[in-house]
Amino acid sequence: MIAWAITDKGLARRENQDSFHLEVSHAVTQAVCVVCDGMGGAKSGNVASQMAAGVFMDEMRVLAKPGMSQKGIRGALAGAVAAANRSVFIKAQSGAAYYGMGTTLVGAAVSKNAALVVNVGDSRAYLIDSDGIEQVTRDHSLVEDLILRGEITREEAKAHPSKNLITRALGTEEAVIPDLFSVDLKDGDFLLLCTDGLTNVVDDQEILFEVLHGGDPNSCCERLKNLANDRGGPDNITIVLIHI
């Protein structure tokens, strides 16, 4: 298993409010990673994403035990998200500078044959293999809800004025309910986690091409980041790529 990661502030933002952690050869699984996209103002967005990503990883080191079942790892992921949410929520109540802050989170515990993925918000996980690209997570966003209700198409969602409004985030409420997904893996598969700084300007088929056919896998994250910046880099960009 090989993994790469990159984060970049893009071309339009003053600072990078994304955060990530990646740990390969974790004690229980072969890799654990998390990507967060902060919100709530210049300083507090940074604080929210860094805190959430750090607490999530710290909790996974404590909660994920050797020999743990898939059910146990799911519980560890849910517990890590709950701890991250509590930390951000408490900080958000600590002063006016932090009021209203929050963050998305997408995380994964990856072994040779399977990945367990957890998400809150609109940062995403994708499975990429020889058959194509599949979005594992479902965005917690207004436009995704409109799509599911049949009120707009996916194409219309790209230009919708409320496309950046998310319906679920860490730190905005005392408790949050994450979504959990199980993904079967085989040799040669890729798992990609990213923030919407990538997916808002680079479509799924372009991501698929760069991962499978764009060149050396070691430079794939850099190529995807550059592609987003070539489209104006309107947001922070964070990508974690794991090759099974």
Image: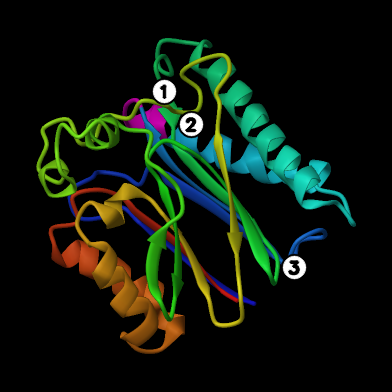
| Residue that carries the numbered disc 3 in the rendered image | 25
Q: CA distance from mark 3 to mark 2?
A: 27 Å
The disc label shown at residue 101, or none: 1
Kindly identify the amino acid type of the residue bearing the numbered disc 1. Met
Q: Quadrant of the C terminus?
A: bottom right
Residue 8: percent from the left, percent from the top?
A: 34, 58
Residue 44, magenta (yes or no): yes
Mark 3 crowdedness (10 Å alpha carbons): few <14, some 14-19, many ≥20: few
Secondary structure at numbered mark 3: loop
- Is 72 on the left or on the right of 140, as rendered? right
**Where does the image place residue 74, in percent across and percent down from the top left?**
71, 43
Residues at circles 3 and 2 in contact by the CB criterion of under 8 Å: no
Task: Check disc 2 and report the residue beneath it.
Answer: 48
Residue 54 lies in magenta, yes or no? no
Residue 114 is situated, as x and y percent measured from the top left of the image, at 66, 63
Residue 1 lies in what quarter of the image?
A: bottom right
Q: Residue 201 versus residue 53: which sits nearer the camera?
A: 201
Q: Are marks 2 and 1 in contact (CB under 8 Å)?
A: yes
Q: Nearer the viewer, residue 233 or 140?
A: 140
- Residue type marked 3: Ser
